[in-house]
Amino acid sequence: MSHHHRITLSRGRFASPASRVIEQTRALGPVSRDELARTTGLSLPTVNRSVSALLRAGLLRERPDAAPVGVTGRPRTPVEVDPTRFATLGFHLGRGVASVAVGDLRGRVVCERTVPQPLDGPPDLEQLAALSAELLGGQPGRVPLVAGLVAPWADLDLDRSETSARLHDVLGLDVITADHVPAVAATEFLHRRHGTGGVTLYVYARNTVGFAVAVDHGSDTDVSRSGSLTHFPTFPTAEPEGCVCGRTGCLGAAYSDHAVARRASAAGIVPVGAPVEQVVDAARLGSLPAHELLEQRARALGAVAAIVRDMTAPHRVVLVGQGFTGYDPSLTTVLSAFEEQTALGSADVSFTRFGAGIQATTACTVALGPVYDDPVGLAPTSGTGSRIA
């Protein structure tokens, strides 16, 4: 089990040859061995040896159909990460809900399921493990290598080490844990890939609000700076909302999905206990009070994102989570509030490409860490496997 707070995004020249080769193959594939030698900085013989080892382990596969016209011979045959043989398991714990997913070795979700979980108690890990076995049963031939477990640990008041140890005992797999917001940032970075040099700030908002910073050091890239925005003070225009910390006006208490839904039900916009999605539906159907409630949140979140940008001075900003993206008409409001608040001038601001599937994708992406750290060593030998395989 691993509990490191730093999430490595690219290992660069500090990694083993096999790790560098599979990492670049995931990013570029199908890719030739010549191109791998150029992008990794390794000699062609070293690349050939690493590719051969990864092919034997079943982590890569050849793609002769992707070879340029007129190119022949195995050394010229492109290779790619094999998305069919092995799998990662992803578990994301939220407030009252959990996502379970099966991912491939490229970090893509193959199948997933979302299920309710106890609000006032620990997650039902036996149920979640059984669900992962059910999902794997629908993917014959896939062998799970490792599991990723992601949660906003402090917000859920869960012990990270104890929870991962329990899941490890049930699964019989190594469990890699990560905090929710840094894990989301890592997922966004890995699946974006282009234009990510320098420093990238990720601001997340849904029921958890926080930020993380990905830094490209040139030799490697990681997410090692993150922080919670749960108790960030909102602005005077926000209605005072009591927080568990005893104060009023904290960002999480005022503008989380749960908070917006509670405010909407108090205003008679939606029934008591309705989720925020019903507030969004009401706004889309023309409810002006619902629209203004979502616009108020958009203005607050855009302004807070600008303040965090001014504090960290990144090269770009990526806004993630349904708090930002759940209601399309408010996207321009977020950007306007950001521009009005920032003291550093115009910024490269974009929104996540992931929708409701970000939680499952994040958990599966976190599980890729050990695969890319030691790909050949992690691939199972004959007779090994997990309890749920």
Image: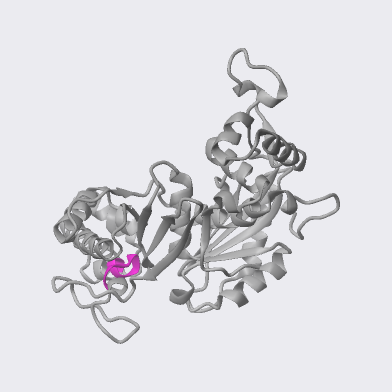
Residue 306 x %, y %: 23, 61
Which quarter of the image is occupied by the N terminus? bottom right
| Rendered residue at 17%/72% (across/down) | 235
Quadrant that contains the C terminus: bottom right
Residue located 50% across and 55% down the image: 362
Q: Quadrant of residue 32?
A: top right
Query: In this picture, is 349 found above or below 97?
Result: above
Magenta segment: does it hold 259?
yes
Tell me the residue at 67%/57% (across/down): 146
Q: How is the image coloured?
A: one colour
**Magenta highlight on residue 154:** no
Which one is nearer the viewer's eye here, 371 or 34?
34
Nearest the eye: 182 or 276: 182
Residue 349: percent from left, percent from top = 28, 50
| Part of the protein shown in magenta | 254-261
Residue at coordinates 66% horizontally, 73% vertically from top-left? Answer: 166
